[in-house]
Image (cartoon, rainbow, N blue to C red):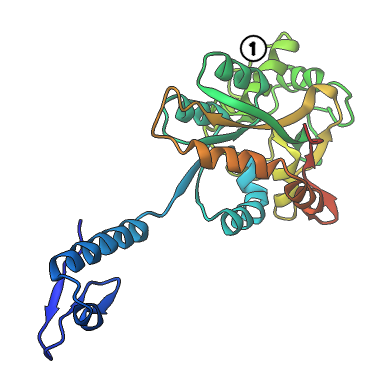
């Protein structure tokens, strides 16, 4: 909406003001500048100032609940915003939902952790400039009493199979997240179809699922970062870990502007460049809880 110009009649000097600036035309009028030209120049200036004030550039980031629950984003994002003059709107959902938001052009950039789904997203033309950011691993946690007897197993798939055979309560994300996708792969590797009274799908983020598992003293699959960030509040133990199948890779992807011209592609590229920079890698390396590192940055590509 164009600024409203007001003329003040407090003295013979011609003066004008808008909410952004005020200016007295006396000096210009004395030099013979025509009022019409002055008004045109003044109006143009005010419109420009109004436009600049109204524009707060935003970047919409769809990311996993694990990056938010762990507390990493609360460290990374403010620094990016400060150095790049962008306001980041974070939408923390499961990877499946994040990819769908990207597919629909509802966000500008994604940070997710489901490599197969990410590659499909890029191959179908929805995303561009995919780069690896960091990694950690998944773990299977459960009650310290370990009624299924899986503690120390080297195979996550074997542990899940034993939980199923013994009918011990397991809480699944059930939300098409990266964690849920991996869980489904592990069940497939175990030649087991989960279901029945012992298997509960929460349809919730990682933090909520860990809280449920704690309350019910059940087993669940979680990323290590979220578990470590909540460990002091949980009565759950790490029972299965360090299986190569539990590797957890995070990547960042820009939404393809060729499909969605309205996306903030420039901002997405700035974010991708920064989150894979030496500065961001140093922050990830130093991000620890209880002396334990939660995420390990990938080497520069």
Query: At x 58% / y 37%, what residue is drawn?
Result: 269
Q: Position of residue 89 (x, y in %)?
A: 48, 48
Label 1 secondary element: loop
In this picture, residue 101 sits left or right of residue 69: left
Residue 39, compared with residue 248, is above or below; it is below
Front position in the image: 53 or 61: 53
Specify the farthest residue to the front.
32
Query: At x 52% / y 17%, what residue is drawn?
Result: 125
Front position in the image: 125 or 64: 125
Q: Position of residue 18 (x, y in %)?
A: 22, 72
Q: Residues within 10 Å of mark 1 (few under 14, many from 20)?
A: few
Specify the farthest residue to the bottom.
11
Residue 146 seen in the figure: yes
Point out the image quarter for the N terminus: bottom left
Q: Position of residue 218 (x, y in %)?
A: 68, 35
Quadrant position of residue 115: top right
In this picture, residue 77 sits left or right of residue 11: right
Q: Position of residue 9 (x, y in %)?
A: 10, 86
Instruction: Name the residue tied to disc 1.
Output: 193
Residue 235 seen in the figure: no
Residue 262, compared with residue 36, is above or below; it is above
Residue 36, compared with residue 104, is above or below; it is below
Q: How many marks?
A: 1
Point out the image quarter for the C terminus: top right
Query: At x 45% / y 30%, what residue is drawn?
Result: 101
In this picture, residue 147 sits left or right of residue 64: right
């Amino acid at each position: 909406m164009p600024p409203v110009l007001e003329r003040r009649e407090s003295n013979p000097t011609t003066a004008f003001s808008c909410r952004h600036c005020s200016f007295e035309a006396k000096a210009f009028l004395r030099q013979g500048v025509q009022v019409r030209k002055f008004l045109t120049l003044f109006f143009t200036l005010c419109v420009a100032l109004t436009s600049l004030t109204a524009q707060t550039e935003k970047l919409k980031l769809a990311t996993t609940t694990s990056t938010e629950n762990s507390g990493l984003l609360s460290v990374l994002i403010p620094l990016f915003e400060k150095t790049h003059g962008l306001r980041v709107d974070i939408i923390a959902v499961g990877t499946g939902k994040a990819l769908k938001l990207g597919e629909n052009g509802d966000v500008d950039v994604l940070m997710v952790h489901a490599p197969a789904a990410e590659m499909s997203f890029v191959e179908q033309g929805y995303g561009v400039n995919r780069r690896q950011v960091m990694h950690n691993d998944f773990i299977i946690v459960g009650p310290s009493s370990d009624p299924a007897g899986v503690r120390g197993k080297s195979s996550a798939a074997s542990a899940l199979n034993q939980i199923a055979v013994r009918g011990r309560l397991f809480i699944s994300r059930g939300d098409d997240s990266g964690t849920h996708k991996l869980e489904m792969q592990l069940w497939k590797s175990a030649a087991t179809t989960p279901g029945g009274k012992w298997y509960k799908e929460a349809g919730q983020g990682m933090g909520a699922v860990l809280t449920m598992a704690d309350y019910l003293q059940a087993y669940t699959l979680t990323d290590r970062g979220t578990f470590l960030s909540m460990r002091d509040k949980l009565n759950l133990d790490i029972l299965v870990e360090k299986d190569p199948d539990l590797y957890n890779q995070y990547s960042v992807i820009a939404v393809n502007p060729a499909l969605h011209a309205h996306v903030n592609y420039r901002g997405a590229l700035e974010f991708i460049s920064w989150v894979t920079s030496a500065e961001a890698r140093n922050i990830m390396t130093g991000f620890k809880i209880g002396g334990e590192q939660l995420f390990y940055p990938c080497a520069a590509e």
